[in-house]
Amino acid sequence: MTHSSKPRVTHTGYPRRYLREPPADPAYAEAGYPFALRQAVYDRRTALALSPEELALRWRVPVSRVGEVEGAAPVPPLIALAGLASALDAVLRIRLDRDEASFVFAGREGAGEGEPTERWGEAGEGAPVRG
């Protein structure tokens, strides 16, 4: 009896090897974080008609730091992002998914529109609470 080299086929008609999506490489996803942040900072800064120098003054950092963030340097620590959001008169929403990231600076006037609020830690450690 000879052995067939054909892959086993499932009830859907596809070989089993195509049914599972390969796991996303975390390094690949992380590499995109600075680029997503760069675009969000640039978009918000230009929407406010701020120069890099003006943003640096508001953020209380050297102009070179604004250039680093807009130039896709590694993502700064959360405390620095909080200061950046304040300098941009915005609320920063960060979404990290398996293979993508988004950073959105929403103006404070419309920060809560269209999305439920989430408060962490009120319904158990680390669990979001929708309000």
Image (cartoon, rainbow, N blue to C red):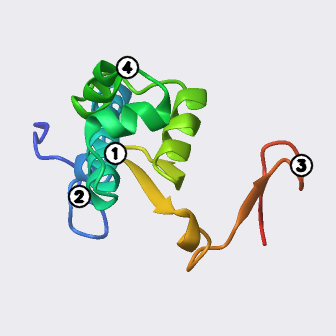
Quickly name the residue at label 2: 9
Task: Give the residue at x 49% y 38%.
Answer: 84
Label at residue 3: none
Q: Secondary structure at mark 3?
A: loop
| Mark 4 element type | loop
| Distance in Å between CA atoms under marks 1 and 2 | 48 Å
Looking at the image, is mark 4 or mark 2 earlier in the sequence?
2
Q: Residues within 10 Å of mark 4 (few under 14, many from 20)?
A: few
Q: Earlier in the sequence, mark 3 or mark 2?
A: 2
The numbered disc on residue 62 is: 4
How far, Cα to Cα, is label 3 from label 1?
33 Å
Disc nearer the start of the sequence (1/2)? 2
Quadrant of the rendered structure where residue 26 is? top left
Quadrant of the drawing holding the C terminus: bottom right
For the point 78% across and 44% down, the residue is 126
Asked if one can make out residue 2 in the rendered structure from this viewpoint, the answer is yes
Q: Nearer the viewer, mark 3 or mark 2?
A: 3
Residue in the image at 30% along x and 44% along y: 36
| Mark 3 or mark 1: whose residue is earlier in sequence | 1
Q: Position of residue 119 (x, y in %)?
A: 78, 56
Q: Position of residue 46 (x, y in %)?
A: 26, 54
Q: Mark 1 — residue?
A: 41
Q: Type of residue at label 3?
A: Gly
According to the picture, the residue beneath numbered tag 3 turns out to be 124
Residue type of the residue flagged with mark 4: Pro
The relative height of residue 99 versus residue 68 in the rendered view (above or below) is below
Q: Is 111 on the left-hand or right-hand side of 54?
A: right
Q: Do residues under tags 1 and 2 come within 8 Å of each other at their CB atoms?
A: no
First reached walking from the N terminus: tag 1 or tag 4: 1
Q: Which quadrant holds residue 51?
A: top left
What amino acid is at disc 1?
Val
